[in-house]
Image (cartoon, helix red, strand yellow):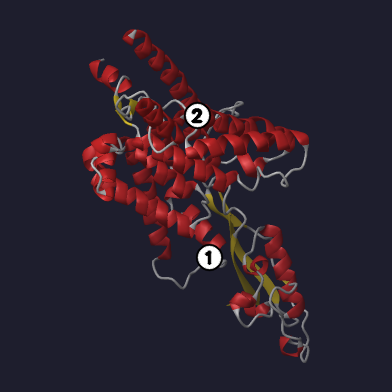
Amino acid sequence: MADVTFYGRLAVGGIIVAWMQWGPIAHQVMGQRIGWGMMTWRMYYGAARDVCDVRYYSVDEAGNRTLIDRMEALGYDDFWDANKRIRRVADRTHVERQGRTICREYLPAGMALEAVARCGSYKGWVPETFDGPLCHGSVRPGQDRSTRPPRRRGGEQ
Amino acid sequence: MTWLRDRVMREGPTDVVALMRIGIALLVWTRWGTQLAYYWRPGPEHWALDTVFFLASTAMLVGFWSRTSTFITALTLFVGWLHFYPEHGMKDEFEHHHTRILMAANLFLALTPCGGSWSVDRWLAIRKARAAGAADPPNIGSLWAVDLIALQVSTTYFWSAWDKSQWGFLSGERIENMLVHWYFFDYPYWIPGFHEACVLGAWVTVAIEYTFPFILFVPRWHKWTFPIGFLLHAVFFVVLPVGTFTCTMFVLYLAYLKPEVLRRGIAWCTDVEPASR
């Protein structure tokens, strides 16, 4: 009877251990599509991919580059006043969209805007390359941001 | 082979599985209490699942028909994962490693005498024995399936480390991604040594996750591994959106503990001799 119990438990335990390990082996080692009822353990695989490290530079006609304070250029005196979706740049499209806002509302005419960006992925930071400047400034003298109404918390960019 | 036989046939105090039963039942409620409530997805199929889930998990918590109720609770969660996720689009509710480990542990717990202590089952057993003029039944039982729970925790650690064993993580960049995503929003160039700290964090995390699956099985190292593990998961709890995962791991660490040690600890804390309970 003890033998039946022992081998019975061994069989049940063996099946469970095989099930436990097969999912990760098939998916994480062999790269197979995960089967029905199989578990895998990929933690933070998809997390924090929608984030970019971006720096905007104004470039004058002589080619001199100057780092721009992104939040100031977007009209926020205090970084923490901005909506999270403005503070955090999600992807390449977002980099370009914020760049256009900066060109339209902050960058003086005659200046170009360049961006150096890298975005999060499973493999870490992946550089984003842009062909030339993102856009050109269109703010005329007397039309600079000091004449714009201050942005409110969570306002549109 | 003798070692394996001893391990598979071992018996011990049931406090450890009873505490896991109570802990997991509460965690299951915390994790799915909202998503399996009647208002979440109104419809007959969902309501049926909700009803079974709440009846079974309540019985599991109080320890009434403990094994059966624990099994049925696990079954409802697997039905949620394998049917309601693909068929009803309930991905957020069921398809996550934090939920899968809870489901698996719940299932394996049904293979243990989890109603042997701290339960209505135990109270009924004592009442029946006393009515018959017999001594209180001993609260010991077969604990072979506790090793399956421990193995599940080790599996989670090991394969999680395996997944992190790629340059994106080991370079510290994945941790940077997360910290920038959740905290800084812009890369914190103003923090000296930020990158180096992330690299260190990545290597320490992977080292712990590769070694813990094995050394947690060594009782004499528990005085080191338990505090480190608890601290690691506590930090995860407050800095990352891990939800119930930290508390799940706290409860499941019990699977590595010698049941006799736990019983002595409970006796020491409650000032009651184990034999008299």
Q: Is residue B166 visible?
A: no
- Residue farthest bottom in this picture: A142
Q: Nearer the viewer, residue A142 or A6?
A: A6
Q: Nearer the viewer, residue A11 or A103?
A: A11
Would residue B100 be found to the left or right of residue A136 on screen?
left
Helix, strand or loop for disc 1: helix
In the image, which disc is placed on residue B183?
Answer: 1
Image quarter in which the C terminus of chain B is found: top left
Q: Nearer the viewer, residue B46 or A121?
A: B46
Task: Tell which subunit mark 2 falls on.
Answer: B
Q: Check disc 1 and give the amino acid type.
A: Tyr
Disc 1 to disc 2, C-alpha distance: 47 Å
Task: Tell which subunit mark 1 falls on.
Answer: B
In the image, which disc is placed on residue B85?
Answer: none
- Residue farthest left in this picture: B220
Residue at 48% over, 41% down = B24
Q: Earlier in the sequence, mark 1 or mark 2?
A: 2
Would residue A46 be found to the left or right of residue B134 on screen?
right
User: What is the x, y in percent for residue A125?
Assistant: 54, 55
User: What is the x, y in percent for residue B93?
Assistant: 63, 43
Q: Is residue B130 above or below residue B261?
A: above
Residue at 40% over, 40% down = B19
In the image, which disc is placed on residue B65?
Answer: 2
Helix, strand or loop for disc 2: loop
